């Protein structure tokens, strides 16, 4: 597996397991789960509880690459920003999924959905929406809107979602998120913000008999990597890099 650090300013690989039932929130249960993670990854020493009941354990962010794990009321999340390798971050996700059934009482039938997301951020100071038009174009039916006198694009966040099986249980979504607002356009004051590209592979429903969370996660990760390697790099990431480079 290759790394993707050459194709964007930052990239990350996240995993989310969503459950149908509420997860245990007791002090002993939550701390035991995170202690198991810290034993494997001692640098994960920053623990805190957000206002909405989300417990997070993460590494220091100063170096630009770090791990994090979170437990919310109905989901368990794991991620790594600028990982040293794809294999490394998938081992982290696998450990979370290996611990979750025992530490958090998650059953295979309690799985609402499981997803893996590959994300890519590009730092750009300017109109993100116009940049996407220049870099990626628009669908033919929308092309002439750019010719309207005095028109400025203030929202352009293309996305596409498709199923990979007849039952639509496994789905993929490619989406782009911009941070330019009408205020930025009106004032001409564009902060240095990130344009994000997200590719998410998600499977819905309970696991099959004998299927593990880890095996399901690895299949989703493989789907993501095949789509990134076969389509996203050449059709999205490189055009964005080139458009930003010439600005």
Image (cartoon, helix red, strand yellow):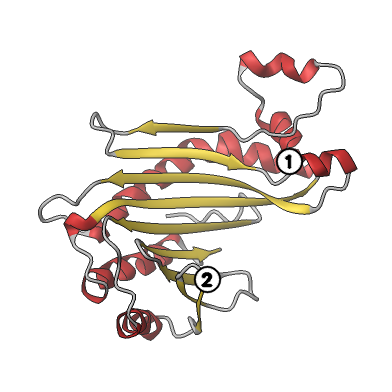
Identify the secondary structure beneath mark 2: loop
Residue 81 badge: none
Mark 1 Cα-neighbour bin, 10 Å: few <14, some 14–19, many ≥20: many
**Labels 2 and 1: the sequence-earlier one:** 2
Q: Position of residue 223 (x, y in %)?
A: 36, 44
Q: In this figure, which residue is indicated by the disc labeled 1?
A: 128
Say which quarter of the image contains residue 38.
Answer: bottom left
Q: In this figure, which residue is indicated by the disc labeled 2?
A: 51
Q: Position of residue 18 (x, y in %)?
A: 33, 56
Whole-angstrom CA distance, mark 2 to mark 1, is 31 Å
Q: Residue at the location (58% across, 69% down)?
A: 65
Q: Quadrant of the N terminus?
A: bottom left
Q: Residue at the location (78% across, 54% down)?
A: 192
Q: Quadrant of the C terminus?
A: top right
Q: In the image, is residue 75 above or below residue 168?
A: below
Look at the image and tell me whether residue 38 can be seen: yes
Identify the secondary structure beneath mark 1: helix
Q: In the image, is residue 167 above or below residue 42?
A: above
Instruction: Give the left or right position of residue 97, taking residue 51 as reference.
Output: left
Q: Position of residue 97 (x, y in %)?
A: 29, 66
Look at the image and tell me whether residue 247 can be seen: no
């Amino acid at each position: 597996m290759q790394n993707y650090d050459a194709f964007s300013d930052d990239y990350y690989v996240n995993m989310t397991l969503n459950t149908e039932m509420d997860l245990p929130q007791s002090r002993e249960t939550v701390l035991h789960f995170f202690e198991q993670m810290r034993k494997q990854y001692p640098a994960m020493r920053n623990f805190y509880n957000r206002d909405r009941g989300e417990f997070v354990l993460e590494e220091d962010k100063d170096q630009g690459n770090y791990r994090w794990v979170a437990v919310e009321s109905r989901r368990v999340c794991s991620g790594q920003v600028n990982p040293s390798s794809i294999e490394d971050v998938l081992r982290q996700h696998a450990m979370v999924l290996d611990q979750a059934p025992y530490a958090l009482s998650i059953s295979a039938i309690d799985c609402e959905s499981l997803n893996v997301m590959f994300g890519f951020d590009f730092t750009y100071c300017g109109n993100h929406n116009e940049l996407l038009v220049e870099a990626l174009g628009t669908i033919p039916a929308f092309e002439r809107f750019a010719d309207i006198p005095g028109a400025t694009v203030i929202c352009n966040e293309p996305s596409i979602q498709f199923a990979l099986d007849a039952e639509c249980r496994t789905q993929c979504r490619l989406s782009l998120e911009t941070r330019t607002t009408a205020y930025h356009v009106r004032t001409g004051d564009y902060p240095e913000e990130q344009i994000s590209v997200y590719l998410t592979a998600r499977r819905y429903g309970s696991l099959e008999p004998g299927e593990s969370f880890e095996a399901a996660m690895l299949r989703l990760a493989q789907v993501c990597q095949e789509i990134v390697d076969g389509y996203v790099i050449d059709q999205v990431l490189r055009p964005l890099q080139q458009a930003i480079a010439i600005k």
